[in-house]
Image: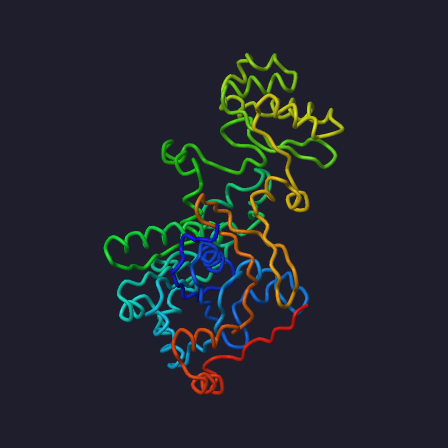
């Protein structure tokens, strides 16, 4: 397959670090042309984030910018803004994740783009949203986790709240933004109208709190959700179980049929009809005994694979907790092309995570390397806007655009 869902869509990408670049990476993998607009001489912030490999190349940057085009513009220069607006006339989307107000201070807010192209769609990602009492607060993913309720629910009850092991606020906001952009494109297709999309990291994390909010509102505040460690607070068994010797297994048995099969698997049929374990809520209330029984059984196996085979044979939802090296060798992950190898002009061949969407008629496979800083200055300015060699040279000499990064292959 070579067709892509978003072939023909052009994006002006003002994003940096994670939330914005992750979104535009997905759009790129779906077929959109991404023109990444970067600061001359420095580039987007993620170019400097670790791990740093050969040639000074950032693994963080490579992971988020495969197949994009890079141009460098000094956005404080009026001539650079003129170039941006000329590009906007030929674009479908503008995406940015600056602090609210920054794009307006540059004269590049939605109102300005709309004057140039009335049906353009702009997506802004920020910690708290474009308006409101917190809008001007600076923030990172960790701030959104703290203020969303997610961090309060993460960790163990006798310990401080935990940060999620990945920047889930950034990538969750990107995923919500992708859905919003799809809806906005469909709306434009029907009506001819563009619009401004406002995505907040905090909003997106609060939206995925499952029953925590409902527990408070339905109980009139009497139910106070809190951290429950490795196991679900209100349903059981559902959690992480210690199999001994540094090995861990997750499993869940939330209905009576799976609970009966689990009890048979761990050779504890007496627990099936025990009144203390008759439903998921009671099993959560009495989870100490449930956990002890499951972990005692797991620890009898020298080969954890044998225990997992028994659970699988009994149709108990379960899995080992994989470390990253194990993950990269997993046959299901590899079969689904979730690891993509790029040949980077600075670092050489590198394996990176791929976009997870799969379609029956189109592809998202993208093994193109990320762009060097300013690599596509001439491609965009000459090929797309029709500037002459002399005009491009003048812009470069006057530092409206930057020098292109040299390609020195590892």
- Tell me if residue 261 comes above or below residue 366 in the rendering: above
The quarter holding residue 326 reads top right
In percent of the image, x 65 and y 46: which residue is there? 328
Q: Nearer the viewer, residue 206 or 326?
A: 326
Q: Position of residue 364 (x, y in %)?
A: 49, 51
Q: Position of residue 156 (x, y in %)?
A: 58, 39
- Tell me if residue 64 comes above or below residue 154 in the rendering: below
In the rendered image, the residue lying farthest to the right is 302
Q: Which colour scheme is used?
A: rainbow
- Tell me if residue 364 comes above or below residue 115 in the rendering: above
In the rendered image, the residue lying farthest to the front is 1
Count all numbered tags in the image, as a single digit.
Answer: 0
Q: Which of 245 and 276 is in front in this view?
A: 245
Q: Where is residue 184 in the image (x, y as percent from the top left)?
A: 32, 54
Q: Which of 383 and 381 is in front in this view?
A: 383
In the rendered image, the residue lying farthest to the left is 191
Q: Position of residue 96 (x, y in %)?
A: 42, 63
- Tell me if residue 317 comes above or below residue 279 in the rendering: below
Which corner quadrant holds the C terminus?
bottom right
């Amino acid at each position: 397959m070579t067709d892509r869902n978003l072939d023909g869509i052009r994006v002006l990408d003002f994003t940096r670090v994670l939330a914005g670049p992750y979104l535009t990476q997905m759009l790129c993998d779906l077929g959109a042309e991404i023109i990444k607009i970067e600061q001359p001489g420095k580039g987007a912030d993620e170019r400097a984030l670790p791990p740093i490999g050969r040639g000074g190349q950032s693994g963080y940057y490579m992971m988020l910018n495969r197949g994009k085009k890079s141009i460098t513009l000094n956005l404080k220069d009026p001539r650079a803004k003129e170039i941006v607006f000329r590009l906007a006339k030929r674009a479908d989307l503008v995406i940015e994740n600056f602090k609210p107000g920054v794009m307006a201070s540059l004269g590049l807010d939605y109102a300005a783009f709309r004057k140039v192209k009335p049906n353009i769609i702009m997506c802004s990602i920020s910690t708290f949203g474009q308006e409101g009492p917190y809008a001007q607060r600076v923030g990172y993913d960790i701030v959104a986790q703290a203020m969303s309720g997610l961090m309060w629910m993460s960790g163990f009850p006798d310990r401080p709240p935990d940060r999620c092991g990945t920047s889930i606020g950034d990538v969750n906001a990107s995923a919500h933004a992708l859905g919003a952009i799809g809806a906005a494109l469909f709306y434009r297709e029907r009506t001819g109208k563009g619009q401004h999309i406002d995505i907040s990291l905090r909003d997106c994390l609060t939206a995925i709190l499952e029953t925590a909010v409902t527990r408070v509102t339905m109980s009139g505040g009497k139910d106070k959700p809190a951290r429950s460690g490795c196991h679900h607070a209100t349903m059981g068994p559902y959690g992480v179980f210690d199999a001994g010797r540094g090995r861990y297994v997750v499993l869940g048995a939330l209905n009576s049929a799976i609970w009966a099969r689990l009890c048979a698997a761990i050779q504890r049929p007496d627990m099936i009809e025990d009144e203390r374990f008759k439903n998921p809520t009671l099993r959560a209330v009495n989870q100490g005994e449930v956990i002890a029984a499951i972990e005692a059984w797991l620890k009898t196996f020298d080969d954890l694979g044998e225990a997992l085979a028994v659970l699988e044979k009994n149709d108990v939802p379960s899995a080992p907790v994989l470390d990253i090296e194990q993950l990269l060798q997993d046959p299901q992950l590899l079969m689904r092309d979730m690891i993509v190898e790029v040949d980077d002009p600075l670092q050489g061949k590198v394996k990176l995570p791929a976009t997870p969407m799969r379609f029956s008629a189109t592809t998202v496979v993208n093994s193109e390397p990320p762009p060097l800083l300013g690599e596509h200055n001439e491609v965009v300015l000459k090929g797309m806007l029709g500037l002459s060699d002399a005009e491009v040279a003048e812009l470069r000499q006057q530092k409206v655009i930057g020098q292109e990064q040299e390609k020195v292959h590892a």
